[in-house]
Amino acid sequence: MKLFTKFLLIYLAVSVVVLGIGGIISYHIIKDEIDRELKFEFLDRIDRVTYLLEQGKTFAKFRELDQDENLVIVPLDTFKENDTQVSDTLIWDDRFERDEKNVKVSAFRNINDTTYFISTYGNMIESNDVREAVISILLWILGLQVLGAAGIGFVVSGPLFKPFRNTLHRIQNFQINEKEYLKAEPTNVKEFRDLNIFVEEMTKKAVSDFNNLKEFAENASHELQTPVAIAKGKLELLTETNLNEQQYSYVEKLETTLNKLSRLNDSLALLTKIENHEFSTNETVNISKIVKDGINAFQELLSLNNLHLVTDISDSIMLKIHPSLAEIMWSNLFRNAINHNIQNGEINIKLNSDYLEISNTGKELNTEPSVLFERFKKGEQNSESIGLGLSIVKRIVDQNAMPISYTTVKNRHTIRISLKSVKID
């Protein structure tokens, strides 16, 4: 929901509540004022009749003059104290053919030694009429308020929120690997100015931390390669000397450990580069060719482990992905299927326009398959694997918005990657 829409809804809700309360108050004020004025009018009529009677007007003549005023004048035989009473009454209305609410004013007046009963009445404005009038007025006011707020909002929100939209657009397009922080743009709105300054400080710190971390990772990776290479060289020289069987076994295990350390170093450096979006340039690649070339490259390893390969690969499947990432992704998937297979096992590869799937035989897992996408997670803790292959695959597919799944059925392991979001038709 847009900010302007949310503001308009809140404004509308507040207006409805305020106008509702104001309507109730207005209804009672208007109704009481009308009733009071009507009663004053009838009291004035009583006073006028009293005055005319005091002037000696005959009863018959007065009735003739005031025959249209719902007036009752009755001389009484008994004496009554001067008194005035105001009440409501129901009077039959021939036009509406029903009883209508009327206000009635009755008075006793002593004039020239005679007590007169004087009464007059008239239609009151009904509550429903007052209510309908108030509601109609409030609806007009509410409608005009909404139209005014919407009009002002559309006119004002454009230039008013332009600095905010510009900042939001710059944040959305910010790439930390470009090593450029977002400089605060000038604006005369304090809140937007504070926001821009905050964004500048945060992006400046993010770029600085990114550069420091990248430099540390590159330096650590580079510095680690040198001692590993030296150690490998020394071990090779050591194997050329006269070693007994036990000593040679120790050297062989140490060489295996160094190879594993070297692969670990390379994998961590690669993960750092992927997470830092250093492979952000997407190109159109032929994933069919990459898969086929990868299969050919691993033929010796397949034969060595007596693995049976079944393929169903469509030609010319084009994806929008960095070529190096595509090769690394497939190499890790294929190597994982080989390394975690069984002797005389099987590997099935299927590639079409919708997905890439690789399935292999292997030992049953003692953990959830999805856990293996995490760093240093392995199905077998005593395996020679460093536990980063599938983690690298997961980072690559996540960066390219390709959903991935890992399922197992007994000793059959299946990894499927959806290609719908990156395929080129």
Image (cartoon, rainbow, N blue to C red):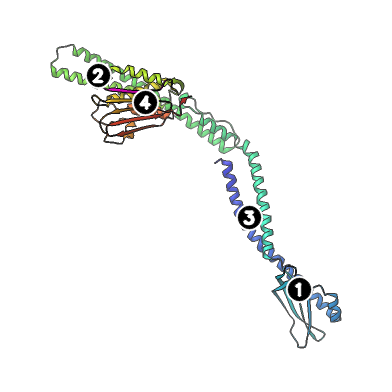
Q: CA distance from mark 1 to mark 4?
A: 101 Å
Residue position marked by numbered label 4 in the rendering:
350
Sequence-earlier tag: 1 or 2: 1
Figure quadrant of the N terminus: top right
Q: What type is the residue that disc 2 sits on? A: Leu
Q: Is residue 126 left or right of 406 when viewed as pictured?
A: right
In the rendered structure, which segment of residues is drawn in magenta?
Answer: 304-315
Sequence-earlier tag: 2 or 3: 3
Q: Judging from the image, what secondary structure is the residue with disc 4 in?
A: strand
Sequence-earlier tag: 3 or 4: 3
Q: Quadrant of residue 217?
A: top left
Sequence-earlier tag: 1 or 4: 1
Sequence-earlier tag: 4 or 2: 2
Residue position marked by numbered label 2 in the rendering:
304
Residue position marked by numbered label 3 in the rendering:
19
Q: Nearer the viewer, residue 188 or 64?
A: 64
Q: What type is the residue that disc 3 sits on? A: Leu
Q: CA distance from mark 3 to mark 1?
A: 35 Å
Q: Is residue 293 left or right of 319 when viewed as pictured?
A: left
